[in-house]
Image (cartoon, rainbow, N blue to C red):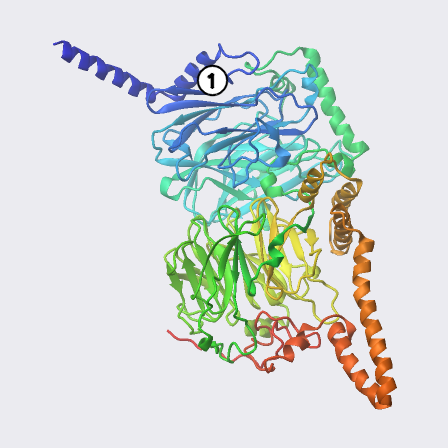
């Protein structure tokens, strides 16, 4: 009997715990609130950040660790690890903040915070890896409630392992009493699997300008939706002080359906969508922010400070778990004309009564008390901030402001220069054709070993002619430590003939192209045999099963779809399923392009699609259209053309392009044509605007033929040079300066020259690259000085060999004149002419590698060039005005053989 009673008691206790695990979010937060009242008065809740409820639920308190910001527009970040290892779901949020203390706060999910400190200045970044916005708060917003069965997935194999809280302290006058701030948010987490996964869709204008005094200014955003269906349940608007109303819509078959509309001067909460709205494939998401520039005397731009403006429309959605995507963005206006039909309500400001504003300036129940005088001081301080715009908005002021709100998309001002300590220039490599970064940010190099692409490699039908050499016997894929160039791993022996393109997917597999084999390969990092092969070995073609010298390959990290640029003798992009099944293709050939556009190729026409860059943030694929000297971008799902990026500074050839999450695009161009001034260099661009932010060139040597480029999120850039057979490394000049000064044991501080560089870039946006080149030169000289190398010493060392050589030549001339007379002098002229000719090159303009190659291995003008636009990875002859990399003119292209 006693045993039965004990068993019954145990069952009752288990049942009680399970019931606690299924408590509603309201009861969970009530219990948490009651439990936290006894905690520290300085930072409420910080002493007990995790509270468990039953078997399945817990709360996590994320708070600023008693900070006191000292400067207005300060952004501070702190991180909290997920307290469990397995997969859990966020089902509720509760903010702890007041607009009298903070301007706004954002909660990010990621796997590696930017710092391990207790808290840090967000100028260092929020996360080192890709981050997703999970929650946003501003202006005394109430808690956000998720629908039943919906949660943000975190932890486990797929979800984030860290939370990073970013708090923007707009005005620090509230901290005159030196009190500590503990603003933050409490999360309700559950282990119970949620059938529907929540995500965030951010619509944001990045290029709006509000003229001073203009009464009405519209900022419009619109994107085509190309994903699985999603269901919208909440929205949030965000601007600064000039915003009057923000509205969001779904546009389907010309019909506008309201998602949400609100004044950004009211509490910036996530408000529930009034009527259910679903978004299907090919719908358009559109948003409009209405501003007024009245009261301003200078232009107002989009930016992260209180003096700037923002136009953001956040949408919370849920999707079926199997199709779930946690974060998507839209920063463009895909169809400006359609906004003529936007409902009139979007243009009508929402009035905010003065008594409501008073309430909004009231105080959160869990923050410190403050009297009326502090409110007046707050208002006065805000007026002073506005007045500051009329006095001085120069670069020295802007340098002191944090620009971190959505910095992952907007990007920041910086300068790239060569990392002179990089030992990678001394590596023994073959022709470097492809570069990539793996999941650990190690550098992966694809090179040709002892094989060379030259005029004898292919016949006129693009069939490889050097099969007798066999495959490359060296490991063609080499993994390097990105800091010291130490070889970590190598593979790819006896597999390839002429390597070209390289990428690494999210699982660490290598994807490569071989132009001789006309194939695309998927290789595991430790596998000797390919996991997947596309194309038929040594058979060029233009149908669904063949390639013709494919140049690059990219894999969508979300869908797993494969994209191949094909290539040198086809002009198309082909999409395959994750299993390698043909899906579709787009692009037009060079012949058609020349016939229809008379030298100016239209969108979707290629003259060697040479390099691919996936833009998963915007669901786009960008292509380096090499011989057209431009970048073309297309929608991943449809191949629809979205934009072209083309600058005079590119010259006629653009070889490679790379994208960094956060909105930065990197590229390298080719050798200029005779008589053209554009030099070989790297470019940094704003992806949203296409504007050139910076250019960079090597310091120690010169580019010979930069062929591929890859960049990491910390702005470290690698360039593979196919002729120099090396890999260049470039990095943020500020980072290198900091490292150099630190090594010398000197206090790190910003130099006047660096301020001048940043001020110049802020004041003069580079419509041409002349000013950028001047800045490059200035910085390079400055960097050389910082490494302790004297310019005079370098000049002297360079002059000495020239003087010695001239002395030797004069001596030889004198001796031969003495012994051989006039005939000897004639012989000397031809001999010395050959020596100096090799030094000067054709026309005395420098070493001419064109003549050098032309005099070796029976070099001929025969080849497989596609309408004089294609060839191997050799540079052009300065005397040859064709478009070929290889020094050969070619007859018009015969149709590529097609085989099934």
Residue matched to label 1: 48
**Residue at horizontal 50 percent and vertical 16 percent from the top:** 47
Residue 360 drawn at (x, y percent): 61, 20
**On the image, which quarter does residue 248 sit in?**
top right
Screen quadrant of the C terminus: bottom left
**On the image, which quarter does residue 373 sit in?**
top right
Residue 166 drawn at (x, y percent): 58, 30
**Residue at horizontal 53 percent and vertical 12 percent from the top:** 40
Q: Nearer the viewer, residue 786 or 405?
A: 786
Q: Nearer the viewer, residue 207 or 8?
A: 8
Screen quadrant of the N terminus: top left
Residue 315 seen: yes
Q: Nearer the viewer, residue 724 or 486?
A: 486
Tell me: residue 27, above or below residue 311. Answer: above
Residue 388 drawn at (x, y percent): 77, 30
Crowd tier of the residue under label 1, counting other residues whose Cα lies within 10 Å: few below 14, some 14–19, many 20 or above: few
Q: Residue 753 vs residue 272: left or right?
A: right
The secondary structure type at the circle numbered 1 is loop
**Residue at horizontal 57 percent and vertical 33 percent from the top:** 115
Count the labels in the image. 1
**Residue at horizontal 40 percent and vertical 64 percent from the top:** 534
Tell me: residue 58, above or below residue 575. Answer: above
Q: Residue 846 vs residue 232: left or right?
A: right
Residue 621 seen: no
Residue 526 drawn at (x, y percent): 40, 54
């Amino acid at each position: 009997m006693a045993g039965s009673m004990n068993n019954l008691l145990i069952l009752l206790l288990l049942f009680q715990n399970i019931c606690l695990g299924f408590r509603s979010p309201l009861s969970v937060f009530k219990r948490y609130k009651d439990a936290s009242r006894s905690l520290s008065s300085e930072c409420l809740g910080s002493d007990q950040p995790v509270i468990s409820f039953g078997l399945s639920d817990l709360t996590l308190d994320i708070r600023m660790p008693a900070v006191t910001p000292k400067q207005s527009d300060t952004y501070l970040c702190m991180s909290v690890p997920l307290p469990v290892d397995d997969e859990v779901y966020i089902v509720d949020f509760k903010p702890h903040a007041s607009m009298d203390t903070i301007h706004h706060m954002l909660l990010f999910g990621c796997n590696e915070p930017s710092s391990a400190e207790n808290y840090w200045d967000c100028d260092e970044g929020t996360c080192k890896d890709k981050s997703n916005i999970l929650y946003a708060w501003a202006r005394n917003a109430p808690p956000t409630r998720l629908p039943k069965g919906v949660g943000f997935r975190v932890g486990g194999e797929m979800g984030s392992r860290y939370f990073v809280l970013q708090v923007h302290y707009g005005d620090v006058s509230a901290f005159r009493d030196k009190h500590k701030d503990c603003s933050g948010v409490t999360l309700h987490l559950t282990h119970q699997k949620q059938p529907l996964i929540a995500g965030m869709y951010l619509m944001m204008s990045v290029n709006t300008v509000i003229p001073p005094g203009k009464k009405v200014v519209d900022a419009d955003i619109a994107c085509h939706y190309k994903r699985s269906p999603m269901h919208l349940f909440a929205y949030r608007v965000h601007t600064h002080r000039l915003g009057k109303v923000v509205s969001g819509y779904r546009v389907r078959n010309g019909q506008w359906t309201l998602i949400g509309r609100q004044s950004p001067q009211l509490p910036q909460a996530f408000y529930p969508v009034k009527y259910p709205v679903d978004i299907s494939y090919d719908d358009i998401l559109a948003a409009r922010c209405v501003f007024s520039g009245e009261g301003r005397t200078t232009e107002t731009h989009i930016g992260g400070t209180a003096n700037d403006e923002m136009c953001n429309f956040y949408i919370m959605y849920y999707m079926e778990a199997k199709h779930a995507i946690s974060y998507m963005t839209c920063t463009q206006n895909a169809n400006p004309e359609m906004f003529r039909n936007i409902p009139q309500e979007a243009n009508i400001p929402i009035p905010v009564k003065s008594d409501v504003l008073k309430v909004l300036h009231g105080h959160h129940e869990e923050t410190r008390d403050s009297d009326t005088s502090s409110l007046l001081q707050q208002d006065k301080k805000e007026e002073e901030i506005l007045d500051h715009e009329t006095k001085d908005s120069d670069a020295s002021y802007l340098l002191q402001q944090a620009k971190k709100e959505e910095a992952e998309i907007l990007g920041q001002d910086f300068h790239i220069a060569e990392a002179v300590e990089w030992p990678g220039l001394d590596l023994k490599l073959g022709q470097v054709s492809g570069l990539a970064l793996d999941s650990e940010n190690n550098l992966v190099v694809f090179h040709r070993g002892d094989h060379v692409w030259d005029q004898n490699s292919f016949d006129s039908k693009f069939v490889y002619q050097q099969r007798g050499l066999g495959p490359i016997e060296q490991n063609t894929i080499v993994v390097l430590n990105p800091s010291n160039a130490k070889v970590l791993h190598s593979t790819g022996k006896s597999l390839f003939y002429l390597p070209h393109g390289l990428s690494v997917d999210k699982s660490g597999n290598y994807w490569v192209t071989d132009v001789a084999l006309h194939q695309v390969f998927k290789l595991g990092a430790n596998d000797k045999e390919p996991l997947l092969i596309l194309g038929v070995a040594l058979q060029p073609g233009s149908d669904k099963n063949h390639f013709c010298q494919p140049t690059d390959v990219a894999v969508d990290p979300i869908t797993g779809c494969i994209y191949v640029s094909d290539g040198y003798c086809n002009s198309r992009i082909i999409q395959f399923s994750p299993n390698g099944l043909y899906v579709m293709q787009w692009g037009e050939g060079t012949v058609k392009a020349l016939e229809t556009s008379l030298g100016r190729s239209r969108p979707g026409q290629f003259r060697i699609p040479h390099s691919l860059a996936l833009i998963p943030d915007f669901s786009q694929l960008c292509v380096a259209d090499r011989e057209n000297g431009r970048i073309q971008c297309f929608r991943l799902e449809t191949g629809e053309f979205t934009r072209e990026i083309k600058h005079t500074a590119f010259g006629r050839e653009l070889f490679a392009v790379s994208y960094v999450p956060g909105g930065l695009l990197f590229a390298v161009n080719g050798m200029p044509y005779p008589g053209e001034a554009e030099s070989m260099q790297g470019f940094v661009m704003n992806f949203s605007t296409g504007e050139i932010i910076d250019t960079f060139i090597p310091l120690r040597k010169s580019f010979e033929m930069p062929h591929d480029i890859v960049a990491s999120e910390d702005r470290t850039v690698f360039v593979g040079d196919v002729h120099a057979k090396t890999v260049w490394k470039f990095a943020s000049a500020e980072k290198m300066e900091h490292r150099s000064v630190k090594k010398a044991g000197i206090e790190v501080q910003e130099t006047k020259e660096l301020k001048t560089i940043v001020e110049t870039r802020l004041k003069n946006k580079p419509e041409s690259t002349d000013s950028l080149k001047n800045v490059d030169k200035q910085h390079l000289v400055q960097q050389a000085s910082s490494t302790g190398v004297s310019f005079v010493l370098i000049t002297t060392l360079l002059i000495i060999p020239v003087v010695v050589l001239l002395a030797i030549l004069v001596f030889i001339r004198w001796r031969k004149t003495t012994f051989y007379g006039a005939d000897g002098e004639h012989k000397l002229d031809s001999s010395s002419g050959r020596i100096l000719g090799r030094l000067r090159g054709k026309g005395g303009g420098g070493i001419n590698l064109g003549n050098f190659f032309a005099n070796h291995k029976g070099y001929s003008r025969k080849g497989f060039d596609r309408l004089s636009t294609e060839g191997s990875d050799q540079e052009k002859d300065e005397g040859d005005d064709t478009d070929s990399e290889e020094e050969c003119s070619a007859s018009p292209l015969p149709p590529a053989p097609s085989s099934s």
